[in-house]
Image: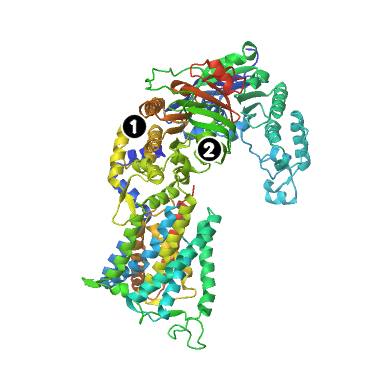
């Protein structure tokens, strides 16, 4: 071994509540090396980084297996503070800066340089004066290292967004012992030119002997700057590559990979027809923080299962939320030839559309209410079902008996595992909670069912059940299903077509049997190869 | 969350006992035991238990509606209605109007309520509009709105053109007196309706029936579409929104209903007490009602009619019994009033700190 590794991971495994998210990861980074970690959402990248940085979330959930070695010594990193002391820095996706402080103050936050004064001699070192002069010089040096020509005395709030990232980086390299810096999707929020600048800065840092772990899913950047590449998929390290020996195509293919096999889906009575459209989106825009939809156009055929794929933050999640009136939307939505009134959840429900939210606990459920109430409440409110007349005209009460019977039936049909229909949904497992959400939407007897991330956070067995249910709804009841998912494989197992969303627009529509390479390229915003259907 | 729950189950072998404890809650358990202790003490001191019980039941019926006024706002997630005086003064105005025309008996009572009703609806709507602008701080703002309204009404009591000599200051002939006696008007009409004695305990049937009737109405209301929409609004506003519910409308509605209940509650309170107390008397009306609701087990996340009923019974019995019992035990000291303050305010403090809002 010519050079010893700064950081080495040996056989790292981690599971959350029995769901394995990392399996036997081995990885090592040498000084001055830029090591890229690529993978789809949910591949385990963030967990891996949290682990290296000693985030409390790891230890609160039972720690991990395997060893972390620094310079060949096993280290136990139990807190971010300890990670910092060991010389590990982290640049976050979201900025952790104080806007009302200057660049210098942010860089030196909690590591301020001080000099003694009269008060501190009496009252202790916490009363020492800040040594602004030296602090500024230090900051200047750090900024220069990054090739950044901003004034170190500017307030952070006045900086353009792109520069804030650099302040974070400057803070990391100003730490005297900085040896390894983790960049967690640093370019996600940056414009192209700023991203280029960042890449240059990373190379500069590497040239100074700092090891860099670079998490991203922008394949161009990977090819541009990294020395070595690890590809994660479903918590496993599928391939360790050297940049010189690989290509964008190969990475794309490995990243997507194929795991779930598209089984034999039951046949339909009538196949979807290109001329029989149930829904059209024209120039559709949604303002959903982090998932902006910009000028989205899509035609949905009656009776099909359409997938909406793409990486997090590209806007795929915003579409369903916008159509259903949960986030401010603009543009045209035409259902069965009629324009839908936007920004009105009631109108969307009246148009026979139902939605299973990606935010199960936040939007999908009333956690402390019973399973039965969760299932029927939307039907009561939107369609005035499950109500019985009373002796007073116009006054209708909850029909407990009908609700009980209906809940018992649907619990049986969807195989929701519970003690009884009155159990609060909070006590159900993720998979069963998701089934309650599906039951809620199904009870509305929709023509179009929007499903967002239906298998997020549930275990593999339950995943298959949920997907089977969707196929069942589609085939038996002729529901048109529009399913949003970050897991391409999942979309490819049940969808008829998959629209890939990039930067709030349709990057292209692929058949589920298109090649891994095409999918991999398209989600990364590379040229759409060919369009179908 | 799920993990903790399974853990909890493993630790406890007699799980039904633990379930009961968890359902009933520590505060209610303590209060109940304390109450039991007071009763035993009262027995030992050879006090008149029947008298104590009569007084307790009387106070339960008297305060019930005011506590019930907490329910709608709790359910929709607006929080405890600390602005209870807003509705309360509407009830007082109704009471005063009815008195002005020398109406007596049930006519007087229901006229007072009918007059209070539109006032409560209008002021409730305005109050709701205000609270809607300060989302997340409804309880604090409500407290001060309550204080402000009481202060503002002092001017009204002084300047309102009432003429009935039984009501206005004897000297000067202008402005309402601080305390108006209802003895010749509609004092205790509800209390005395079908009143009977049970083992020496006086049961104010009409008063209890009236409270029970409103509790029944409330429990029915929360089974209607609107009531269920309110529950959804409080439990998860996003769920409610995605179900096509206008959450803002539900919040408005809950505040108006709460205000109306407070107004009716004020009339009931006055008839049972036998006096209309004006000026600064309504200032602290909200706190006992809030404490009662919280003792009953209502939280900022979940509240039901049973919480209100249990809370009213526990809290009012406690207050009624604690006073004479402690007075007898600790001769000459006024510890009971202090204890009352500690219990009611301490209860509010405890419950509010336990209930961090999402």
Which residue lies most toward the bottom here?
Answer: B171
Q: Which mark is residue A414?
A: 1
Q: Are marks 1 and 2 on the same chain?
A: yes
Mark 2 highlights which residue?
A322
User: As rendered, which of A178 and B160 lies closer to the eye?
Assistant: B160
User: As rendered, which of B304 and A81 lies closer to the eye?
Assistant: B304
Q: Position of residue B221 (x, y in %)?
A: 36, 55
Label 1 and label 2: CA atoms lie apart by: 28 Å
Which residue lies most toward the left here?
Answer: B199
Q: Left of A321 or right of it: where is B209?
A: left
Occupied quadrant, residue A221: top right
- Above or below residue A54? Residue B110 is below
Tell me the SS state at disc 2.
helix
In the image, what residue occupies the spot 33% across and 38% down?
B10
Q: Position of residue B216 (x, y in %)?
A: 31, 59
Nearest to N terminus: mark 1 or mark 2: 2
Q: Position of residue A272 (x, y in %)?
A: 44, 23
Tell me the SS state at disc 1.
loop
Q: Left of A353 or right of it: where is B110?
A: left
- Above or below residue A165? Residue A396 is below
């Amino acid at each position: 071994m010519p050079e010893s590794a700064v950081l080495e991971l040996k056989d790292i495994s981690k599971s959350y509540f029995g769901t394995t998210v990392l399996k036997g990861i081995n990885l090592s980074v040498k000084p001055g090396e830029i090591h890229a970690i690529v993978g789809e959402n949910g591949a385990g990248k963030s967990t891996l980084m949290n682990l290296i940085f000693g985030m409390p979330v790891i230890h609160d959930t039972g720690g991990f297996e395997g060893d972390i070695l620094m310079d060949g010594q096993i280290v136990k990193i139990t807190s971010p503070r300890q990670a910092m002391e060991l010389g590990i820095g982290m640049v976050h996706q979201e900025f952790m800066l104080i806007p009302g402080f200057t660049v210098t103050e942010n860089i030196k936050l909690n590591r301020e340089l001080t000099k003694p004064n009269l008060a501190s001699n009496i009252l202790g070192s916490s009363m020492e004066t800040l040594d602004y002069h030296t602090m500024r010089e230090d900051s200047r040096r750090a900024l220069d290292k990054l090739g950044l020509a901003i004034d170190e005395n500017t307030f952070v709030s006045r900086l353009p967004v792109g520069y804030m990232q650099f302040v974070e980086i400057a803070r990391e390299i100003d730490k005297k012992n900085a040896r390894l810096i983790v960049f967690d999707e640093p370019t996600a929020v940056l414009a192209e030119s700023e991203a280029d600048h960042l890449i240059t800065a990373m190379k500069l840092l590497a040239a100074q002997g700092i090891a860099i772990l670079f998490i991203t899913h922008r394949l161009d950047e990977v090819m541009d700057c990294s020395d070595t590449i690890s590809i994660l998929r479903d918590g496993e390290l599928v391939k360790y590559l050297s940049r010189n020996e690989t290509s964008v195509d190969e990475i794309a293919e490995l990243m997507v990979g194929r795991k779930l096999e598209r089984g034999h889906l039951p046949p339909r009575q009538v196949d979807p027809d290109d001329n029989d459209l149930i829904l059209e989106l024209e120039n559709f825009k949604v303002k959903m923080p982090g998932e902006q939809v910009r000028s989205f156009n899509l035609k949905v055929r009656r009776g099909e299962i359409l997938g909406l794929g793409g990486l997090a933050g590209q806007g795929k999640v915003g579409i369903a939320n916008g159509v259903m009136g949960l986030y401010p939307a603009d543009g045209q939505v035409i259902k069965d030839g009629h324009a839908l009134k936007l920004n009105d959840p009631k109108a969307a429900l009246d148009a026979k559309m139902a939605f299973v939210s990606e935010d199960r606990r936040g939007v999908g459920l009333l956690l402390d209410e019973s399973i039965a109430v969760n299932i029927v409440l939307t039907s009561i409110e939107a369609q005035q079902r499950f109500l019985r007349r009373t002796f007073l005209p116009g006054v209708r009460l909850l029909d407990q008996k009908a609700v009980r019977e209906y809940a018992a039936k649907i619990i049986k049909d969807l195989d929701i595992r519970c003690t009884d229909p009155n159990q609060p949904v909070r006590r159900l497992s993720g998979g069963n909670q998701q089934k309650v959400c599906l039951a809620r939407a199904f009870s509305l007897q929709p023509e179009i069912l929007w499903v967002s991330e239906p298998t997020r956070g549930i275990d593999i067995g339950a995943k298959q059940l949920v997907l089977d249910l969707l196929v069942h709804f589609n085939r038996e009841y002729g529901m048109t299903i529009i399913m949003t998912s970050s897991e391409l494989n999942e979309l490819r197992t049940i969808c008829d077509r998959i629209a890939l969303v990039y930067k709030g627009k349709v990057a292209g529509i692929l058949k589920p049997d298109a090649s891994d390479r095409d999918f991999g390229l398209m989600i990364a915003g590379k040229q759409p190869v060919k369009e179908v259907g | 969350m799920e993990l903790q729950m399974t853990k909890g189950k493993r630790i406890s072998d007699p799980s039904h006992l633990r379930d009961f404890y968890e359902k009933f809650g520590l505060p209610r358990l303590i209060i109940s035991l304390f109450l039991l202790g007071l009763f035993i003490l009262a027995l030992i001191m050879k006090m008149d238990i029947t008298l104590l019980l009569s007084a307790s039941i009387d106070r339960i019926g008297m305060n019930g509606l005011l506590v019930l006024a907490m329910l709608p706002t709790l359910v929709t997630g607006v929080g405890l209605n600390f602005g209870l005086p807003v509705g309360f003064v509407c009830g007082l105005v109704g009471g005063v109007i009815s008195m002005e025309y020398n109406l007596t008996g049930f006519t007087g009572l229901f006229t007072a309520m009918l007059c209070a009703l539109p006032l409560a609806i209008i002021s409730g709507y305005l109050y709701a509009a205000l609270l809607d602008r300060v989302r997340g701080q409804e309880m604090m703002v409500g407290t001060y709105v309550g204080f402000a309204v009481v202060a503002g009404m002092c001017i009204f009591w002084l300047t309102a053109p009432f003429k009935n000599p039984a009501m206005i200051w004897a000297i000067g002939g202008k402005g309402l007196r601080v305390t108006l006696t209802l003895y010749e008007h509609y004092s205790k009409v509800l209390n005395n309706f079908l009143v009977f004695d049970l083992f020496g305990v006086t049961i104010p049937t009409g008063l209890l029936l009236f409270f029970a009737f409103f509790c029944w109405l409330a429990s029915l209301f929360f089974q209607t579409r609107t009531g269920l929409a309110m529950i959804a609004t409080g439990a998860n506003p996003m769920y409610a929104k995605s179900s096509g519910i206008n959450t803002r409308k539900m919040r408005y509605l809950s505040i108006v209903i709460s205000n109306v209940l407070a107004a009716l509650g004020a009339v009931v309170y006055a008839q049972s007490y036998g006096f209309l107390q004006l000026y600064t008397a309504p200032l602290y009306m909200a706190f006992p009602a809030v404490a009662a609701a919280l003792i009953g087990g209502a939280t900022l996340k979940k509240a039901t009619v049973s919480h209100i009923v249990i809370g009213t019974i526990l809290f009012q019995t406690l207050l009624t019994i604690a006073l004479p019992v402690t007075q007898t035990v600790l001769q000459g000291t006024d510890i009971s009033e202090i204890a009352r303050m500690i219990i009611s305010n301490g209860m509010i403090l405890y419950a509010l700190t336990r209930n961090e809002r999402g």
